[in-house]
Amino acid sequence: MESTRVDRWLWSVRLAKTRSDAATACRGGHVRVNDRPAKPATSVSAGDTVRVRMHDRTRIVEVTNVIQKRVGAPQAQTCYVDHSPPSPPREALPVFARDRGAGRPTKRDRRMLDQLGLLRPPGS
């Protein structure tokens, strides 16, 4: 039966951006294979269930195809079946509107923009 390391598989099917990110998630206890905590070297084979917590989202996938190398996104999606719960809807950002040609924002306007997270530091 064909199998591979869980950190390598997560990277190759594009659930993790880098292999070291996948290994760090495993060491941090954010990856489970068949409901058991997984180390980076834990082997995965077809039919296994992998639960990954990355970027504040839990993904539950069933392995259908074991691959060793990173492939394109359309081919990577054929290697697993996604059983993840739907992601929560994003909160709508409040709208801060100014009249066009009103000049520089006032100190009060800048504070409001800063509270909303819309004010970027200079040079960025």
Image (cartoon, helix red, strand yellow):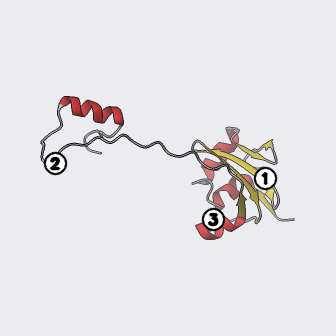
Q: Which residue is mark 2?
A: 100
Of tags 2 and 3, the one toward the viewer is 2
**Measured Cα–Cα span from mark 2 to mark 3:** 48 Å
Q: Which residue is mark 1?
A: 49
- Tell me the quarter of the picture where residue 27 sits: top right
Write the residue at 67% across / 38% down. 28
Q: Is residue 99 left or right of residue 84?
A: left
Dot 1 amino acid type: Thr
Is tag 2's residue or tag 1's residue first in the polypeptide sequence?
1
Neighbour tally class for label 3: few under 14, some 14-19, many 20 plus, Cα within 10 Å = some
Q: Position of residue 98 (x, y in %)?
A: 21, 42
Toward the viewer: 79 or 17? 79
Dot 2 amino acid type: Arg
Q: Is residue 79 left or right of residue 123?
A: right
**Measured Cα–Cα span from mark 2 to mark 1:** 54 Å
3 and 1 marks in contact (CB < 8 Å)? no
Q: Is residue 65 left or right of residue 118?
A: right
Q: Is residue 120 left or right of residue 4?
A: left
Write the residue at 53% across / 46% down. 89
**Measured Cα–Cα span from mark 3 to mark 1:** 20 Å
Dot 3 amino acid type: Arg
- Tell me the quarter of the picture where residue 25 sits: top right
Q: Which residue is mark 3?
A: 70
Toward the right, the furthest residue is: 1
- Under tag 3, what secondary structure? loop
Quadrant of the image containing the N terminus: bottom right
